[in-house]
Amino acid sequence: MSEESSLYPLLNLHTGEPEDARLHYTVSEQRISDLESSWKPILEKHMTNLKERHGYGSEQFDKQKFFDEAGELMIQDAHWNWSKKYDYYSSHLGYSSCCLVCDDKIQGIGFFDHSENFKSKIKNSKSMGIVYVECIATAPWNRNKIERQQYAGVGEVLITYAIEVSLDEGMNGRIGLHSLPQAEKFYREKCNMEDFGIDADKNMKYFEMSEEKAAEWLSKIQ
């Protein structure tokens, strides 16, 4: 990817019309500041309401039920500190980032490890390098469980970027990631990634996309 950004269409669910979104291949400190000032209040509002409903901190509080409902609401990532993530990934070699902007707002963001420290678990690609998706997220107003969803297609753009990074780094489109429970269906069904089940080291499910599936993915979006 020699350019600094590219255009992708997002469907505006309020108007029913597609809109051009610009995917920037780097994330600046200002973007992170904009994200936290716009995303954080919405996520914190819904998390506060959830804590109140479940009696957070009381003897009756059920941590698992609380976490499960957070997943249903798509807010299990509400605690993520994007400033810390940015500081870490921007100061270490082997990482790349992107953010998707539409309507002058950040619609999605991602950080990716292309150091080849992560190897494929797929049988015919074992020990071959993959791009590891450290984290991706879509803006809270694009999550239909908590807000009137504005745009559709953000997650697909972020996965496409990860595949393109993998291609650029000579890993033939192979990508892998650990998923929050709220996103497992997206990776399994929408992205058609292989589900390796729970990784005991992270207590999260691990998903991987083969180079063949990556080629299929790109052929569908082009």
Image (cartoon, rainbow, N blue to C red):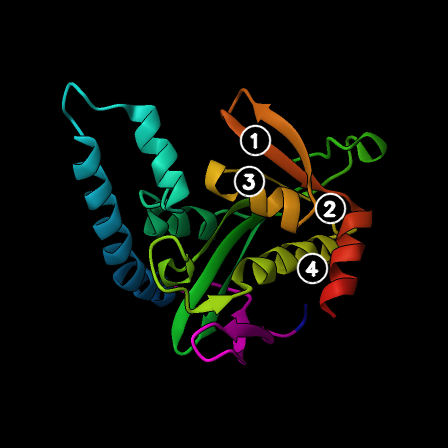
* Residue wearing tag 4: 164
Q: Residue 69 at x, y = what percent?
A: 35, 37
Classify the position of the C terminus by image quarter.
bottom right
- Residue 15 belongs to the span the image colors magenta: yes
Point out the stretch of residues depicted in magenta: 3-28
Left or right: 52, with 74 as reference point: left
**Closer to us: mark 3 or mark 2?**
3
**Disc 1 designates what residue?**
205
Residue at the disc numbered 2 = 174
Q: Secondary structure at mark 3?
A: helix
Q: Is residue 22 visible?
A: no
Query: Could you tell me how far apart the alpha carbons at marks 1 and 2 are, in whole angstroms?
Result: 17 Å
Residue nearest the observer in this picture, 27 or 67: 67
Callout 3–callout 1 Cβ contact below 8 Å: yes
Nearer mark to the viewer, of 3 and 4: 3
Task: First in sequence, mark 3 or 4: give its number.
Answer: 4
Q: Are marks 3 and 4 in contact (CB under 8 Å)?
A: no
- Magenta run includes residue 20: yes
| Mark nearer the N terminus (3 vs 2) | 2
Which is the main secondary structure of the residues drawn in magenta? strand
